[in-house]
Amino acid sequence: MILCLSPLALLGVESYFGGGVDPNQIAQVGEASVGLSEYQNAVNNRRSEILEQVDDASLLNEDVLHEQVLKGLIDRTLLEQQAGKLGMTVSDDTINRLLREEEIFKDADGNFSNDQFANFLRQRGMTKNQLFAEFRNQLSLDQLNASIVGTAVYPMQAVSQLIDLQLESRNVWVHRFDWQDYADQVKLSKNDIQAYYDANKDTLKSAAMVNLAYIQLSPQTIKVDDVTTEELQQQYEAYKQSLAADDERRVSQILLTGDDAKARADKVKARLAKGESFAAVAKAESDDPSGEAGGDIGRFNPSVFGGDADAVEKSTRRLERWRCDSPYQDQLWLSDIHSHRR
């Protein structure tokens, strides 16, 4: 039996009780009861939720609010009792595990914090046992709800059809014909095969395939030892020595090209022989951009001369000042050795 005392929002809840009825009890639901404080908290919480959605508080019907809240508390109590009768409960170990997974109770490192758990209880005026009881009731209700929602109800006709389909049997006879037994009855010429192939090229195509062998290298599979600063320095010094030349010469050039290169070279040598500045003559006569810098091309660098590097290197080693060497391809090259370092 459910004894439900409807709330009177305007006159006050106290007006409902008297004559031996517990003033702290709103409704009796079987062996359980709905307490006054629980009811008032539920009303306040529901009122706050509604006011967050509407701006005008005058739209709030207090009578309907109290009635809906009380009905919800009674329904919840009935469901909790039914879950208990069905043995739907949750152990303390399960609740402990679930609470430890709640983000609200974790610290900055993602671990469960007893301090944050204690602050949570303190802010809500609850004890650990009260929180466990609330958690257990909610989880039990979730189990009950899942057992109802997740259970499909089939009409007997559908069940009968399903059983008939599962028990139904069909007899099938199969005979296999091997192509080898009929091979001697078929005569095909090469022309027949070629004609069939030409007519069905598109359907007879197969995907291109490649036999591939490879080695996969990745930072995860290749172990690289740590390199010290000293080892880097040693490697750097060794690299510098490998680039060092036994004989370095600083070279200036006058590069003459074209069909009249030989005649121009004779005139240039004559001017140099008279004592004119090599840089001045290079700036005036050289067909190379280095002429703007007086023909200076710096230290001899074989990579600059490409395929002529060996011939140019030999020439620089034997050249004297103002000497014109043999032409390279269609060019004439005059050089001036500025400095010489061994």
Image (cartoon, rainbow, N blue to C red):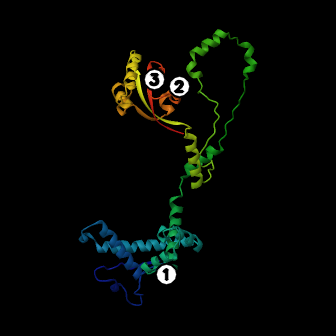
Q: How many marks?
A: 3
Q: Position of residue 142 (x, y in %)?
A: 51, 66
Q: Which residue was labeled with disc 1? A: 127
Q: Position of residue 308 (x, y in %)?
A: 51, 25
The kind of residue on which mark 3 rests is Cys
Q: Secondary structure at mark 2?
A: helix
Quarter placement of the C terminus: top right
Q: Point out the residue furthest to the front here.
A: 274
Mark carried by residue 311: 2
The kind of residue on which mark 2 rests is Ala
Q: Residue at x 30, y 66 (%)?
A: 53
Dots 2, 1 in contact, CB < 8 A: no
Q: Within 10 Å of the Cα at label 2, are there few (<14), some (14-19), or many (20+) other Cα atoms?
A: few
Q: Position of residue 162 (x, y in %)?
A: 59, 47
Q: Which residue was labeled with disc 3? A: 324
Q: Nearer the viewer, mark 2 or mark 3?
A: 3
Image position of 318 with respect to 32: above or below: above
Residue 46 in view in this figure: yes
Image position of 266 with respect to 296: above or below: above
**Foreground pick, 199 / 182:** 199
